[in-house]
Amino acid sequence: PLIVKTGEAKPIGLAVACTVHGDLHDIGKNLVCMMLEGAGFKIVDLGPNTPADKVVEAVKEHNADLVLMSAMLTTTMLYMRQVVKALEAAGLRDKVKIMVGGAPLDGKFAQEIGADAYCDDAATAAEVARNFMLARNTAA
């Protein structure tokens, strides 16, 4: 965090993070944000209970590389699909990698909703995010 504050380290990417609409749990999201920041990402944290239109707006405004979504409730995890659809409708889906996490989720669910990755902990999320950026930079 001190290196990030000095401005000497150029961010390797920008991630928009949120806990989806209807869910107020944010400890996991906060841990992921801290790990990604430590891995060199700039983070736009939209907080808990975030509707799809706010995610789309933030992706546009900040030219995000990643969208990170969290849900702790089985009743709110389904909202992640709406966020993916909103990104598609806005023409942004192919511009961002979508990563999801939370206790009720798994890789199968991530695949079903069109996410690019499921991560079951913050350290894995940071590694997956870095790999996405490395792959993007290598392809460019």
Image (tube, rainbow, N blue to C red):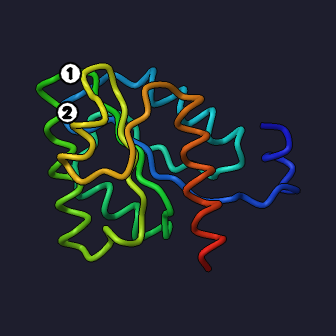
| Res. 91 mark | none
Secondary structure at badge 1 equals loop
Please name the residue shown 27% across and 42% down the image.
110
Secondary structure at badge 2 equals helix
Q: Is residue 20 left or right of residue 39?
A: left
Q: CA distance from mark 1 to mark 2?
A: 6 Å
Give the quadrant of residue 108. Answer: top left
Q: In the image, what residue type sits under mark 1?
A: Leu
Q: Is residue 11 left or right of residue 59?
A: right
Is the residue marked by circle 2 packed among few (<14), some (14-19), or many (20+) residues within 10 Å?
A: many
Pinpoint residue 11: horizontal percent, then vertical percent: 71, 58
In which quadrant will I find the N terminus? top right
Please name the residue shown 33% across and 35% down the image.
19
Please name the residue shown 62% across and 80% down the image.
140
Looking at the image, is 49 positioned above or below residue 43? above
User: Which residue has dot 2 on it?
Assistant: 77
Is the residue marked by circle 1 packed among few (<14), some (14-19), or many (20+) residues within 10 Å?
A: some
Q: Is residue 44 left or right of residue 74?
A: right
Pinpoint residue 103: horizontal percent, then vertical percent: 31, 19
User: Which residue has dot 1 on it?
Assistant: 73
Q: In the image, what residue type sits under mark 2?
A: Met
Looking at the image, is 47 positioned above or below residue 66? above
